Amino acid sequence: MGHVLPAGFSELEPFVDQWVLADTAARSAKRRSCSYAELRQFYDAMVGHAERALELLSAQQLGCLGAPEQRLLKLMLSLAEIGPAIEWYESPEVLDGFPADRFPMVEMLPDTRAQE
């Protein structure tokens, strides 16, 4: 199968099965279904690799990413989804916010769609 993630990111491979998710809706649902401790564990593992991951990904074009890079992108999108839960709310849910199901996705754009 080759490398699950790009070289230098093998430390994050234990999170691939749980956090490489299909789309925005799946990432939001995952955040809401996890405990704060689970979110924190993922956040703490990811944040130390985020700058390097963004450098690697920003040097490439969406639509042309290899499978390892696509998985890394999806991990970073999951990090972006849970970031506010860790940094602002210290809770999987938005405090004093509307229930997430009140805001259904109208159009789902693929995470790795080619840039135009």
Image (cartoon, rainbow, N blue to C red):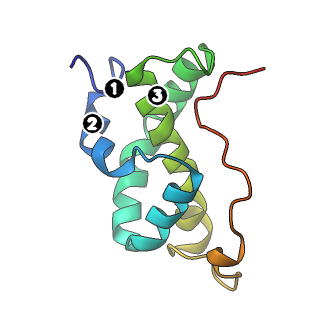
Q: Using a 10 Å C-alpha cutoff, classify the residue at mark 1 as few (fewer than 14 neighbours), some (14 to 19) or many (20 or more).
A: many
Q: Earlier in the sequence, mark 1 or mark 3?
A: 1
Q: Earlier in the sequence, mark 1 or mark 2?
A: 1
Q: Nearer the viewer, residue 59 or 30?
A: 30
Tell me the quarter of the image containing the N terminus. Answer: top left
Q: CA distance from mark 1 to mark 3?
A: 8 Å
Mark 1, residue position: 5
Q: In terms of secondary structure, where does tag 2 sit?
A: helix
Q: Using a 10 Å C-alpha cutoff, classify the residue at mark 2 as few (fewer than 14 neighbours), some (14 to 19) or many (20 or more).
A: some
> Can residue 82 be seen by looking at this rendering?
no
x then y, percent, for residue 60: 59, 14
Contact check, label 1 and label 2, Cβ < 8 Å: yes
From the viewer's perspective, is 50 left or right of 44?
Answer: right
**Given the current orientation, which residue lies at the most extreme left position?**
1
**Given the current orientation, which residue lies at the most extreme bottom position?**
96
Mark 2, residue position: 13
> Can residue 69 be seen by looking at this rendering?
yes
Residue 70 got which mark? Answer: 3
